[in-house]
Image: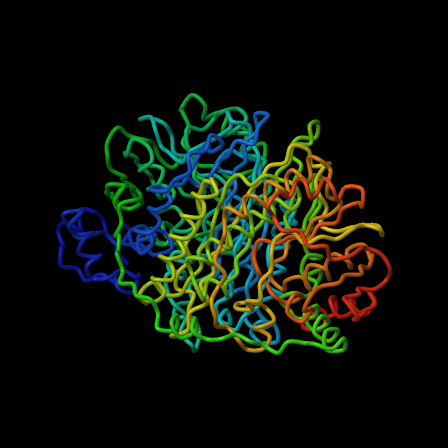
Amino acid sequence: MALDTVAIARQNPDTSQPFAELGLKPDEYARIKEILGRRPTSSELAMYSVMWSEHCSYKSSKVHLKQFGDKAVKSDALLVGIGENAGVVDIGQGYAITFKIESHNHPSFIEPYQGAATGIGGIVRDILTMGARPIAVMDPLRFGPADAADTRRVLPGVIAGVGGYGNCLGLANIGGEVVFDETYLGNPLVNALCVGVMKHSDIKLAKAAGAGNLVVLYGAKTGGDGIGGVSVLASETFESTGPAKRPAVQVGDPFVEKVLIECSLEIFAEDLVVGIQDLGGAGLSCATSELASGGSGGMKVALDQVPLRDATLSPEEILMSESQERMCAVVEPGKIDRFLEICKKWDVTVTVIGEVTDGDHLEITWHGELIVDVPPRTVAHDGPVYSRPLAEPAYIARVNAEIISPPIPKTPAEIKAAILQMAATPNLADKSWVTNQYDRYVQGNTVQSQPDDSGMIRIDEKTHLGVALATDANANWSYLNPYEGAKLALAEASRNIATAGAKPLAVTNCLNFGSPEDPGVMWQFAETVRGLADGSLEMGLPVTGGNVSFYNQTGDVAILPTPVIGVLGVIDDVRTRTPMSFDRAGLDLYLLGSSDSNMSGSEWAYLHKMRGGQAPKADLQREMRLIDLLVKGRTEKIFSAAHDLSQGGLTATITEMVLRHHIGAIITVDDPGVTLFVETPGRVVVAVEPGKVGALKKAAGDIPLTYLGVTGGDALVVNETSISLDELRTAHTATFEKLFG
């Protein structure tokens, strides 16, 4: 095919172009022509198509995401907010933490191992580009029914991809979720979080400033994998018969990434870059346009200088390729020799591909011929913005009107059977089959990980300063009430941080939804964003960034609205954390918080095929008082253990506590058939020494305290029901082995 240059585009304005096949609407194509004053070249068309895709441009979500700015929390801890590769917060002692969560859903359905692996690789590079050393990852995952054939195809590959890539990088996997629901069949959610640490002076930004500075591409060579991959693929629904599009999924090499990390950190340590951007979604199209847009606006790039794994790639394919383990840096001429020297030391491929100019256009040539001449902001930031129609879905009124009354076990035998059923159900069963495939303790600074409420990492080995992270989403509640569902997920993630005694500090999010072209889905999304923005403002937690994933839909069936909320907290001394479970007999058990009888959205209701009713209302003021109590309980050494109540209610919490150290408990509750299975938010079980009960009651203030019982023995005893710990453990641990081998 003849090279399509800017000159040819001017001379041949009526040339037919495959804009629709590249995901562009007719009006979007017309707008590109208006911006350029001519038709785009095929290379420009490729750039606009991937950068204006839903996944890269956020064109359907921007109008709603503005709320995070309009309702922004004023926080002294926030150093870098929304708009960069990741947010950065100050945690004291000169340290800064960067963290972010993103999705890699669609590639993981098509090719589970590589889809998940490159999801980890991409989020790690986002953290690296901020100037930080990546130290840990988390993986909130959602799949179709655990016994479905496609789940057995997707889940093992995803787990192996997450574990394989992360383990090779030497990054501890400190938590996440594994949740099953029929709406995720054909649309698994593979969300990945990474956290990194740096000093304040290490922060790097994505900008190409300074005319004459050099544009440098380093890392892996560019191949044909992932052409139009996540950028196009994640902007399409899957048909019920399979994916609408099957571009090649990106292929990752963690060993190349590990070397790239160490090489980059040495480069950063010597302050050799003006700006930096990783090549993830939309590849070089994204990196060059975002760097130019974030800087002075002018850049010249010689595309034929890009090192290739496949010499047959066309310019368009090079621009769209999402090959992994690549970085683009802006370097001053006086520092380029040292930059190249460090890359040579680490055996990293490096090439100068262009320079920053004092103009306002991004110009890309191919063997001297001009093939791209565009204002970079129009590619990277000023794409289409849609105020899509939204309308409350008809199902809302119907399901909210339902009275949820699953069968309530009453006799000791019925209660025993129900506890064992809950312990074994895939959503609540032991996840060791998954987490044993991850290295949770590499680097030696992991303080806690799954099944703890939060993951915790030591940041400073002298002071023992640390951070805790948790990710949460209750899609059942978001389905019933997206506004409250978002607030409840934020509260739960914050509570999970606080049970260990850490203070919540900042928020990231990954908002997973169906097609934005469905007014009902857009209403769910808008309500979710409103809820998260309102909730974060009320709790004083800045939203530092995140990700929107639309088109998680098969045919007309969308996934449950699934806003995965990540919260980061700080703890001044990890040695003083409150553990999630007790390790000795004779401790008193108390329930913090009040319970009601609303089973809506609960696991017990779901097991009985009920998904309706009214979601709980989030009481964030009460949640904040509970968080303060949990932090105080650590600093004043009141608690011997603390464990959040969430999915599965009291039965799930107490099961996990007694099995952790094989220490039983004898508890007495009113109306056990309800009390054990209700999932009222804002509750925690704590264990205290008898001599500290007075301190607990004093510290609790207006937070309700309910005495449950004592620890000890080799059984879980609830009123007249007794289950040996061996029987309970068998039920809890056998599920995944049976399902996945």
The image position of residue 421, as x and y in percent, is 69, 73
The image position of residue 311, as x and y in percent, is 42, 52
The image position of residue 441, as x and y in percent, is 71, 45
**Relative height, residue 2 to residue 186 (above, below):** above
The image position of residue 262, as x and y in percent, is 59, 36
Judge from the rendering whether residue 270 lies leftward or rightward of residue 391; answer left or right: right
Give the residue drawn at x 48%, y 67%: 187
In the image, 572 versus 141, the foreground residue is: 572
**Relative height, residue 525 to residue 259 (above, below):** below
Give the residue drawn at x 36%, y 42%: 71
Q: Split into 4 quadrants, where in the image is the N terminus?
A: bottom left
Judge from the rendering whether residue 238 lies leftward or rightward of residue 717; answer left or right: left
Instruction: Examine the image and state in which quarter residue 675 appears.
Output: bottom right
Instruction: Examine the image and state in which quarter residue 217 appears.
Output: top left
Give the residue drawn at x 68%, y 76%: 409
Judge from the rendering whether residue 569 lies leftward or rightward of residue 424; answer left or right: left
In the image, 606 versus 295, the foreground residue is: 606
Q: Split into 4 quadrants, where in the image is the C terminus?
A: bottom right
Kindly give the residue lying farthest to the top in the view shown.
334
Colour convention of the picture: rainbow
Instruction: Examine the image and state in which quarter residue 224 appears.
Output: bottom left
In the image, 672 versus 338, the foreground residue is: 672
Kindly give the residue lying farthest to the right in the view shown.
713
In the image, 701 versus 541, the foreground residue is: 701
Count of residue discs: 0
